[in-house]
């Protein structure tokens, strides 16, 4: 995350707006890791977690929107 922040500050200052959403996505992924039999233990099943997929889509859309 440190290098991601340094890259954003140096090259794409507008991507700073997407940083809270990316941090939120990482926090959701981290919270999923504490569940019993979670999808994080089997990465091929991550698409079955609707909360993670919604946040992932919103992070990618916001990053794409800020990049234009």
Image (tube, helix red, strand yellow):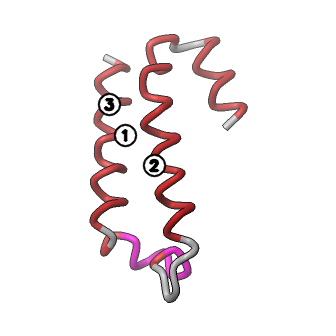
In terms of depth relative to the viewer, which is nearer, 61 or 54?
54
Above or below, comparing residue 44 to residue 8 in the picture: below
Question: Which region of the structure is painted magenta?
Answer: 40-46
Cα separation, mark 3 vs mark 1, equals: 5 Å
Is there a contact, CB below 8 Å, between mark 3 and mark 2?
no
SS type, badge 3: helix
The local crowd at label 1, few if under 14, some if 14 to 19, many if 20 or more residues have their Cα within 10 Å, is many
Give the dominant element type of the magenta stretch: helix, strand or loop.
Answer: helix
Q: Which residue is mark 1?
A: 59
Q: Position of residue 50 (x, y in %)?
A: 27, 65
**Which one is closest to the eye, mark 3 or mark 2?**
2
Residue at 48%, 81% (x, y): give it: 38
Sequence-wise first label, 2 or 1:
2
Answer with left or right where residue 44 lies relative to residue 1. Answer: left
- Quadrant assignment, res 61: top left
Residue at 52%, 86% (x, y): give it: 36
Does 52 appear in magenta?
A: no
Is there a contact, CB below 8 Å, between mark 2 and mark 1?
yes
SS type, badge 1: helix
Does 41 appear in magenta?
A: yes
Is there a contact, CB below 8 Å, between mark 3 and mark 1?
yes
Q: Position of residue 29 (x, y in %)?
A: 50, 60
Q: Position of residue 46 (x, y in %)?
A: 40, 71
Q: Which residue is mark 2?
A: 25
Cα separation, mark 3 vs mark 2, equals: 12 Å
The local crowd at label 2, few if under 14, some if 14 to 19, many if 20 or more residues have their Cα within 10 Å, is many
Above or below, comparing residue 38 to residue 51 in the picture: below
Q: Which residue is mark 3?
A: 62
């Amino acid at each position: 995350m440190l290098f991601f922040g340094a890259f954003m500050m140096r090259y794409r200052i507008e991507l700073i707006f997407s940083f809270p959403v990316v941090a939120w996505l990482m926090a959701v992924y981290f919270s999923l890791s504490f569940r019993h039999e979670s999808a994080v233990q089997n990465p091929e099943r991550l698409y079955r977690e609707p909360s993670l997929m919604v946040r992932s889509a919103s992070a990618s859309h916001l990053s794409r929107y800020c990049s234009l």
